Image: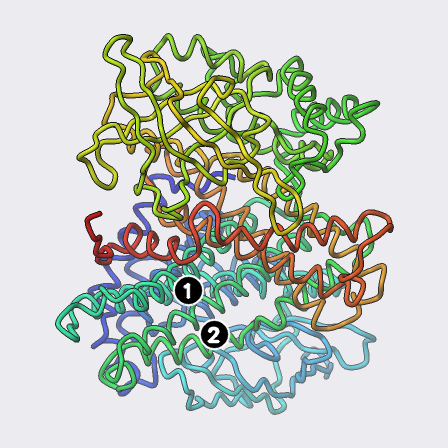
Amino acid sequence: MDFTLNADQKMILESAEQFLAQESDSAAVRRAMENAGGHDAALWEEIRTGLGWCGVAVPEAFGGMGLGQLERGLLMEEMGRRLACVSYLSSACLATDALLHVAHREAQERYLLQLANGSLSAALVLPAPLVWETGACKISAHREGSAYVLNGIAPQVPGAAQADLLLVPARLVGEADAYGLFAIPAMAEGVQVTALPALDASRPVARVELRCVAVPDASRIDPSGWSEELHEGLRRTCDLAALALAAEQVGGARQCLDLTLSYVNERHQFGRAVASFQAVKHRCAQMMIALESARSTVYGALRTAQTCRNADRLALDVACAKAAANHAAFFCAQEAIQLHGGVGFTWEYDPQLYFKRANATRSWLSEDECYARIATHLCDAAEERRGIENESDDSQAGFRAEVASWMQSHLQGEFAALRHRGGPGDEEAYPELRKKWEQVLAQGGWTCVGWPAEHGGRALSVAQQVIFHEEYVRAGGPGRMGHIGEGLIGPTLIAYGTEDQKARFLPGIRDGSVFWCQGYSEPGAGSDLANVQTRAVRDEATGDWIVHGQKVWTSLAHESDWIFVLARCDSASRGNRGLIFLLMPLNQPGIEIRPIRQISGSAEFNEVFFDGARAKACDVVGAPGEGWKIAMALLGFERGLSTLGQQMHFRYEFDMVVEAARANGSLRNPAIRRRLAQAWAGLRTMRYNALRMLSDGGDGQLRRETLIYKHFWSNWHRALGELAMEVLGTEANLLGADDGRRARLQGLFLFSRADTIYAGTNEIQLNIIAERGLGMPKEARVAA
């Protein structure tokens, strides 16, 4: 799934941004709210007839642009950013999609052309906004000769007061469980549309009452005998509208963040900009995390809607997207008020407008409803219906089958014991056998699959690499002993190493015979990676570098052959200047490795002491003094495709938690069901965020979706460990024999507590997000 916008999509986004910034600014929104009941007629006319936006998702055969859900979502995002007071959601989304998915061909030809060219505005009269449930429908239709007579009420219909045409689903009296869809002029006799005062005055809603509304038989526009398809079509219509609304919520969240950043950078308190206070920076960073995780989920769901016809899979993606967008819109709006201080609570400033919009939109397919939908899928759906979220591109089905078949045939015999072993928190499991497995992988051509062919890799496409990582973990492939070499130092050498370094080091990584560890962290530095005290001094006689110092938290150093070390080569330097990036063999005099026993009792972490150890002159990557640049480039590779393998391992752990809940009956607990649904939704967010990261063009820049990734997954994983213990209940405290699941879940709980500490604590991550992602003032550094 490629998240890159094409030229047409970028043009749509940019033109919408420019147009709405000018025509739907704060003053225009306030005028529409105060003088026109929340409807900007001039703006709506320009959107309909001048720009043709209502035809974006209408097929060309019916006079539209023939684009799709993604393009419409991009427009909705910009309209949400500017609180555009128009009936786009009701007319261009709900009514248009009802015609596309429910109406017969003649009605489509008649009405879609008018909707697309802007000569008609319509509203879909549902029992509640974005909801189609037959039991909730309070409108009925009964036959009287060649006509139908409709009666009933819909208490809250967006855009009804601005519509020329009402599309009305109704229960057919006298026909068991039968419903029809009727097209009724809004001015028809017996139709009463009453505009309702609303807390969110920027989006008009109305009560629609039908009193003995007589319409000809031709007004019924669903195909005869098509009752079940009508329900499916209306449900899809509601899902697509909820997805469009989620895109709008992302736009609103984005504007709340932008308004807040502008204010805290301009506002000064206690002699400095409010934006320089760490508490403020962290709150803004949390806003960005909520915004970007929601954007990734919404963009992923929009692409699902564009390509997937599986209604259940779409419904799940919509639930994930809407839940994330609900949270992002409301959280960012409330934080905007808080961080604006007193003025944020005033009518004059805009955060209150977004706060009211966020509150209204989160009630239309609420988080509770979203998680209930997901929980039903996870907990109650038949076995054959679970797992539909993993549906893949048919064009890659052959490659997926090849990987799955190879894994199945090779994870046998002595390697059967490795299934699902050796992951985070379990890295002490079978180290020698896992090294042997690396060589088997290499013989099959499954190491370094993304490396360029000239360096011994398979040069697989991004899509194929995604499939490989998914199928590897799905089959139970063990934690990779060669991960540091293949995923970190190997790509770094390909990008920055000398030809000699590539020739000497890449083959051993590729064939699974040489294993690496990372020498970055130091005891006195914690998350301050640039506070390097390890010293490297040049031996003038040989040109080699003599190293003194200590590294800590070095995973699997005791199982590794080589270590890459960030050291200080200029004794007068401070911070990230004057550093050198060294490649060093571990089996040499002057290096001592000591295990560090962890909370779980295991000891895959180590301290590594350097006391006169040597790195050869030919084993410096880059030039002396460029160590920081190389180190940062290496960390960029860490955020690559292997993250998808990490997520598949998370999915395996999640499934263990679900099965534990199923086994002990806690799956029936509503609180547990909701938390499982939240965890599952988080997995979807991680997947789509990773795919968005991989679609960034590979220019090496750390974009917002990349910056939030570590904070998101580490907090998600820690929460999963806590949930595992709640599912186990009192059994969580007991050690001893069971089927192995309890011990694995206890390990998950204990090890995941470190996730928000290593590789940058939560607090450091929030600083990085604020400073690098939002451009907020950097923390003051005190010279050592």
Q: Which mark is residue 693?
A: none
Q: Residues within 10 Å of mark 1 (few under 14, many from 20)?
A: many
Residue 80 in view, yes or no: no
Q: Nearer the viewer, residue 627 or 175?
A: 627
Q: Residue 85: x percent and y percent?
A: 34, 74
Q: Nearer the viewer, residue 561 or 412?
A: 561
Q: Residue 780: x percent and y percent?
A: 21, 56
Q: Is residue 523 left or right of residue 462?
A: left
The residue that label 1 is drawn on is 248
Q: Residue 44: x percent and y percent?
A: 32, 70
**Identity of the residue furthest to the left in this view:** 271
Which amino acid type is marked by label 2? Thr
Q: Which mark is residue 361?
A: 2
Q: Residue at x 65, y 61 (%)?
A: 722
Image height of 621 relative to 126, above or below: above
Which amino acid type is marked by label 1? Glu
SS at mark 1 in the image = helix
Q: CA distance from mark 1 to mark 2?
A: 9 Å
Q: Is residue 704 left or right of residue 97?
A: left
Disc 1 + disc 2, Cβ < 8 Å? yes
Q: Nearer the viewer, residue 145 or 589?
A: 589
Image height of 598 relative to 272, above or below: above
Q: Residue 130: x percent and y percent?
A: 56, 71
Q: Residue at x 33, y 78 (%)?
A: 338
Residue 481 in view, yes or no: yes
Q: Residues within 10 Å of mark 2 (few under 14, many from 20)?
A: many
First of labels 1, 2 by sequence position: 1
Image height of 426 relative to 686, above or below: above
Q: Residue at x 24, y 23 (%)?
A: 624
